[in-house]
Amino acid sequence: MISSLPNELLALIFNFINEEDLLAALLTCRLWHHLGLPRFAQVHCSLMTLDLEGPSLERAKQIIENGVYRAAVTIIEFRPQRFFGYRGQWLRDDAGTLVSSRHWDTLQKVLNADYPNLSKIVVLADEDHFFEEYSGSPMVATLPEVIGFAFDLIATARHPVQCCDMQLVPRLPMFCFQTVNIPVAISEQFWSRWANLRCLNLDTYTDASGQDAALLGDLIINAHQLNKLRLGNCIQDASGNFARLLDRLVAAPQLPQLTHLSIASAAFQSPDELLGLLRRFKHSLEHIFLEFVTMVVHWKEAIAQMQQELTALQSFAISLSRETANLDQGLRYKQMLLFCPLLYTIPQENLSCFHFREYTGKRMWRRSLSSVQYKGPDARWALGLIKDAVYTLNSFPQDLRIYDPDEFDRLSLEIDYSEFEF
């Protein structure tokens, strides 16, 4: 009860208690402090954010100087301000290399500290936090340098980091990811630690020259213990950069422990491009998420092959892009999944809510969907159901199979993203 009293009231109480009870009160407060410290650290220090500004670095310094706080850190997140360290003292030599300064020295202490329970490193750079106007300023730590800081931390951490999450969605249309250089001094140590990585999110644009595929491919194929992989915003540019990355992954050794694969905002020119990648993991892949993925024409064929070859599949989510480019003909057209038609008995008062026509005394409603999800022991059956029911607008059949709604009740028409979070 006394612990719930405000500090002002406690101070008044201490002014009136007997001298012989004062020591007991002090010991009680010390015990409360001792018991509450781990919980305080868990709540306030488990996520340590670094925005490369003075206050953020000073807070990180205070954390690493306290063993209880430091042990509570499980995630270190590089969350830069709009301009990376724009108000900080980031000094450079004539060659443009960052040199010693107050913030730099503090950052090095933070990177070299021991975090016994560190499991995840995150680099964030959305369009609200990405530098552009001041990217050439000597006072600014650039995005490649920030990624380098994260790699330094992975290389020097005394305990293996389990997850690396790079959410890089810059304002610039193409960000050259290959400018990230792993220092030679830590290269061997970095790759030995990287091999233990379990989760990897490469949510990043690639450069138009096609040179990013090498580094992105190395990051994936050298994570030998990888369980979860997400490729996001891997756009299909004119140089075929995403195709190069796929070729590199298909030719590389398999990742036998990969169970979760998420691909977002990617364009496949044929089912072979997608299936060539999936076949590398067909005996281990249990969960697959295709988010805003485009493919020219061949979704029925792709789903049929997935049903046949992904023998370990337990769940899937497919969210297609409504607009698909037909690169061969230079045309653009709309494509969507058509689960059609489903047979429903619609109450009279709800008739105005549906498009319908007469069919054996009941109403028939044709559903037009672009997203569907399934989780359960019969994922391959669910893929078969979708494969039979998927039609594109340019391949719409004359005679439609009528599906009983009970067949589709086992499918979810709303994507639950939590299953595929990293």
Image: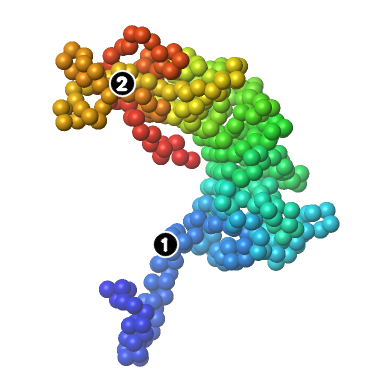
The answer, for residue 252, to whether it is visible in the render is no
Q: Identify the residue at image location x=40%, y=67%.
A: 35
Residue at mark 1: 39
Q: Quadrant of residue 252?
A: top right
- Crowd class of label 1 (few under 14; some 14 to 19; many from 20; radius 10 Å): some
Q: Secondary structure at mark 2?
A: strand
* Circle 2/circle 1 CB separation < 8 Å: no
Residue 189 percent location from the top left of the image: 69, 43
The three-letter code of the residue at mark 2 reads Arg
Looking at this view, is 298 or 354 the one in front?
354
Tell me how far mark 2 sits from mark 1, CA to CA.
Answer: 54 Å
Q: Quadrant of the N terminus?
A: bottom left
On screen, residue 96 versus residue 105, left or right, reads: right
Q: Identify the residue at image location x=59%, y=44%.
A: 168
Q: Secondary structure at mark 1?
A: helix
Q: Name the front one of labels 2 and 1.
A: 2
Residue at mark 2: 366
Residue 392 percent location from the top left of the image: 44, 18
Q: Identify the residue at image location x=62%, y=62%.
A: 53
The answer, for residue 353, to whether it is visible in the render is yes
